[in-house]
Amino acid sequence: MTKAARSRLGIQAECAAWCRIAKIPKPPGNLHSAAGGGPLRPALIRPLGALGMAGVGLLWPFIAVLALLSALEDLADQLLSSKDRAKARAERREAEEQRQAIAAHALDQLFDGDWTAAAGQFLLRWYGHSSHPKRFLVLTENRIVLAAPPKRVSIRQTERMVVVAEIPASEAQVEDPLIGIHPSDRLRVRFTDGSWLTVITEEERSEIHMHLMRLPRLGSGEGSIDTSLSAHIIDGEGDPNQPRVSSSGP
């Protein structure tokens, strides 16, 4: 991932990962308008992607049969092996413990709920930066960078990405509240005003998770503000007391 950040964005990255956010709830109309009234959803899939999805739909019955056969084979193996049964029970227990840990740290929530705070204001502008559903989250020594294709694409997202928001150090940090507890695909961006938002990485233990594990004070959500990567969102307009976000075009 760091190689992609260097080759495609010209950024010397410490770590990077593709991520997404959960569905943005409907904000108060006046705050949405004040933030520019930008989109709150990614763009609809382009025709090429729609054709691809249609192709998958046509093949789905065959895929389902193969999946069923594979599941039956796994079931037979489990019935024949007490070791496999014990392993399956352990995996189910671990998955449930992980789910409970995610909920306990509010990582199953998109943000803290305050639309007037820094995280809420950033979410109001999220899809205004790019209509693509995913973001390439990059951490450098002194800033956080979000990159994406300017518009939604179905293929070659890495080749088409550009910087859409740049976050210098001072106003927020990226943290993994579950570091040392459970592996997960969740990360939190916490702002210095106390607000926060959750991103979901493509991998359960992304490159960013692994980076934070090597620097445990960065990964902890409690008592680590002074040593964590920070982010100040730059924007050319709006209330100077609100986060300011700079967006890049294609």
Image (cartoon, grey):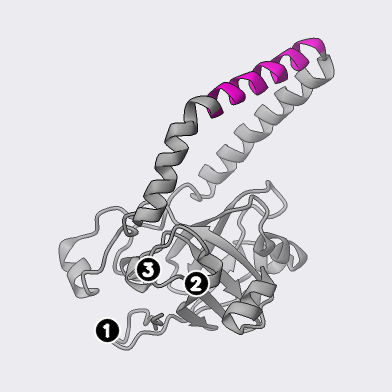
Q: Residue at x 43, y 35 (%)?
A: 57
| Amino acid under disc 3 | Lys
Q: Residue at x 59, y 78 (%)?
A: 8
Residue 81 in view (yes/no): yes
The earlier-in-sequence mark between 3 and 1 is 3
x and y, in percent, of residue 21 in the image:
44, 56
| 28 vs 146: above or below | above
Q: Are marks 2 and 1 in contact (CB under 8 Å)?
A: no
Residue that badge 2 annotates: 160
Disc 2 is placed on an element classified as: helix
User: Mark 2, residues whose alpha carbon is within 10 Å: few (<14), some, or many (≥20)?
Assistant: some
Q: Are marks 3 and 1 in contact (CB under 8 Å)?
A: no
Q: Do the residues labelled 2 and 3 touch (CB within 8 Å)?
A: no
Q: Distance between the residues labelled 2 and 3?
A: 9 Å
Q: How far apart are marks 3 and 1 (CA)?
A: 27 Å
| Amino acid under disc 2 | Arg
Disc 1 is placed on an element classified as: loop
Residue that badge 1 annotates: 239
Would you identify the image quadrant in which residue 153 lies?
bottom left
Q: Distance between the residues labelled 2 and 1?
A: 32 Å
Mark linked to residue 151: 3
x and y, in percent, of residue 221 in the image:
60, 61
Q: How many marks?
A: 3
Left or right relative to 111: residue 206: right
Whether 64 is among the magenta residues is yes
Q: In this picture, which residue range is highlighted in magenta?
A: 63-80
Q: Could you say which is closer to the camera, residue 11 or residue 46?
A: 46
| 32 vs 96: above or below | below
The earlier-in-sequence mark between 2 and 3 is 3
Q: Could you say which is closer to the camera, residue 131 or residue 247?
A: 131
- State whether the magenta stretch is mostly helix, strand or loop: helix
